[in-house]
Amino acid sequence: MTKQGKTYLKLIAVLSLCLIFIAVVFTFIYGTEEEDFRVLIRESAKIAAILFAISFCISSVHYFVDSNCTKRIRSFRPHLGLSFMVFHTFHLCSLIYLQMHLHPVFDLAKGVSLFAGSVAYIFMYLMALTTFPSFKKKLSINTWKYLHLIGGYWIWFIFFNSYFKNVMNKERYYFLFGLFSFVLVIRVGKTLHMRIFA
Ligand code: HEM
């Protein structure tokens, strides 16, 4: 495994241990009732959403801003993407616990949500795997680019849709809805600007 690959594995291990520790402390303090786990599901999704949004839009932000700061954040895109994967794996594990012990979320989920969510997880793990240099070099540049483009927009749409529904139905999460709207605008903006001016 490459030096870079080992760094990524260390990041995944440290973040996973931190999340397990937080979950144990959380359930120790608040208990293991259904609503407690729903808080873990929502909060893990929130952190995953922000990590994903930054990694999915930073190269477009850097295209327009072109500062040392955006350049630095862009160089951490693989780390941000893998951190998103860890937090969203926690979302999935909390859902599986909920399904097995408290509430049949998968049984009650609409078929289209289950399909969209499952495909999103398949994309997420394929994108995480191909972040490791030893797997990335097995794919052609174009295949890698299309996997991360289609997978990225598929995951973006589920987050955007989740927070759009929250804004419309529960009048909450305006910041997260705004963030995911900004991600789309800046990405499309970069594509159009490159087509027209580059
Ligand atoms: C098969 C897969 C999935 C199932 C069954 C599922 C189920 C759920 C459930 C039951 C909640 C509600 C928790 C509550 O408010 O009580 C939830 C929240 C959420 N899920 Fe998932 N989910 C899945 C996959 C995903 C994926 C792939 C994404 C994003 C790419 C995602 C994003 C979110 C977000 C953003 C929330 C929080 C919404 C809020 O705070 O109100 N979910 N999910």
Image (cartoon, rainbow, N blue to C red):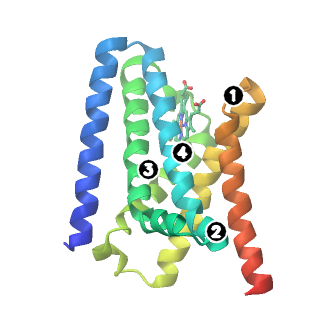
Q: Quadrant of the N terminus?
A: bottom left
* Amino acid identity at mark 4: Ala
Q: Which mark is residue 106?
A: none
Residue 172, horizontal then vertical, whole percent:
69, 28
Which quadrant contains ligand 1? top right
Note whether 166 is above or below 122 in the view shown.
above
Which residue is labeled 3 in the image?
84
Badge 2 is on which residue?
A: 65
Do the CB atoms of the residues marked 2 and 1 lie less than 8 Å apart? Answer: no
As measured in the structure, the alpha-carbon distance from the residue carrying label 1 to the one carrying label 4 is 15 Å
Image quarter of residue 21: top left
Residue shown at 31% from the left, 36% from the top: 19
Task: Report the residue marked by disc 4.
Answer: 49
Camera-side residue of 93 and 85: 85
**How far, Cα to Cα, is label 2 from label 1?**
30 Å
Disc number lying in front (2 or 3)? 2
CB of mark 4 near ligand 1 (< 8 Å): yes
